[in-house]
Image (cartoon, rainbow, N blue to C red):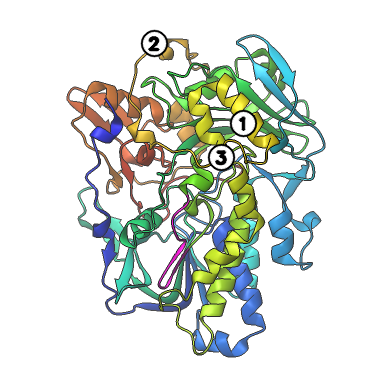
Amino acid sequence: MRPSDYPPPFESSEFVVAPGEAEIEVGVLIVGAGPAGLACAIRLGQLLEGAPELAERLGDVPVAVLEKGRQPGSHLLSGAVVNPRSLRKLFDGRFHTRDLPFYGRVEHESVYFLTPQRYLRIPTPPTMKNGGNYVASLSQLGRWLAERAEEGGATILPETSGHALLVGDGRVRGVRTGDRGRGRDGQELGNFEPGSNVHARVTVLAEGTQGHLTGVALDRFGLEGDNPQVWALGVKEVWKIAKPLDRVIHTLGWPLRAGKKYREFGGSFVYPMGDDMLTVGMVVGLDYRDAELSVHDLLQELKTHPMLKELLLGGERVAWGAKTIPEGGFLSLPKRLHAPGLLICGDGAGLVNVPALKGIHYAVESGRLAAEAAFSALQRGESPGRRGALAGYDQALQESFVWKELKQVRNMRPAFGRGLVLGGALAGAMTATRGAFPPGDARMEADADQELIRTDRAKAYPLPDGDLVFDKLSSVFLSGNATRDDAPNHIRVQREVPKEIAELWTRMCPAAVYEVAENGVEVTPSNCVQCGAITAKGGRLTPPEGGAGPDYKLA
């Protein structure tokens, strides 16, 4: 049995509509106020500062950014250890590393292999070395970048979801925003506000992981690559602690199982956030096979390990969040990252280096390059809607360090489908040869195509005690989730499914959205923190009402 045997009731064509009358007109429309989208807005502001004639031609709103969260940063979640390379290039002396909202530079790091009661320090793999990088809260960094984008002239529209692509004459002409104020059955409530047609000369999709419009665009313009994208789910907590942590920590091994039949790939991280906080998280590939696996509960189990208990002793959990991570890397990139009138960047394009645990600086770099491609296509005598007018973006990305680094590690993620031991040995050989071994490209399998097994894994999960171990609902509360109880359902899944599928979704979801029912699964969409895991494992997340979902402050 496979989750893909029960596809969701979803057609991407439902979210492609004719442009209609322009209710809002902008020059460049960026969907998503994450690192990629905000870097794009910042760079456009820099370029337009030196091109006042073009800025005037683009109208009253030359650059607009749609953000579905309450504010920029509300939906941003990552570890995060940030390579500052792309940010330095983006600001080019206007701001320095010391000006950014970082918690501090990585001075020490350790990698451990865990067993249930012991830990063994192992050499740090070359791809995971973090010298010169900085610890950050991605949500805080996002808010800081948003301020810089606004200072450069961008207009940010929070609580505004991108619902549908506006496509006419074979090119993207903007986005239809989502309605607000509908009831559970879609009826108009007293505070109903219809969505608007936002017309733009260039539309940049920077939606992040599991981007809704990105998926629609890949299908509409035939941009899918040769391999499907694969994903991981990360669940993290922020703790106030009694004793400062002086290093970045990564772990492998327990509580994951090494056997090939389980396909459990991942590990944990512990990062210091100043002297009085740390963040601890668990990341697991969603190509796992056991219907009883729960990443949230694995994180709770991890915290019972002696090493983690010592770090958290006397502490208090103050934040929680969950998010998917694209893990296909180079092998799963789209054929093209542009279409007439359209550019795709950041996590939505799959620009994440899994062996290095890095994607933020790739998002910033791709956003900067997207801005430069858009600026070039907006010059007099050129049209961004012309086929190939935005192809310079693909070329620039392929000539960048992003492309080179992704290509070198392209076969590492699929290697771990053979189990931890063999996968680790292959990854070592790939590192030593800079990706030359093995020759050629591996093949990827979609997460939802993995055949399910069932074990008694759930018996080992510790029971919540409200001190060290917590349940899902109390965790969702800490996310600041702002979804109305009577909001329309934004999750597309088949309801009548076998018990194994229903249990898979129930265990997988970190926010208690799904519950096994007599004939399938029940859905509580108001719990959803929009992590996107359901899209990887047999369902489809669509945009909720603007302003819904989590409101991350420290994540």
Residue 65 visible in the shown view:
yes
Residue 258 is situated, as x and y percent measured from the top left of the image, at 53, 17
Amino acid on which the number 1 mark rests in the picture:
Ala
Q: Is residue 250 left or right of 529 when viewed as pictured?
A: right
Q: Which mark is residue 134?
A: none
The answer to which of 319 and 340 lies nearer the viewer is 340
Front tag of 1 and 2: 1
Image quadrant assignment for residue 319: top right
Q: Residue at x 40, y 75 (%)?
A: 387
Residue 420 is situated, as x and y percent measured from the top left of the image, at 56, 21
What's drawn in magenta, residue-wise? Answer: 333-343
Find the distance from the CA under tag 2 to the CA under tag 3.
39 Å
Q: Earlier in the sequence, mark 2 or mark 3?
A: 3
Label 3 belongs to which residue? 439
Say if 40 sits above or below 6 in the image.
below
- Residue 65 part of the magenta-drawn span: no
Q: Earlier in the sequence, mark 3 or mark 1?
A: 1
Find the distance from the CA under tag 3 to the CA under tag 1.
13 Å
Find the distance from the CA under tag 1 to the CA under tag 2.
30 Å
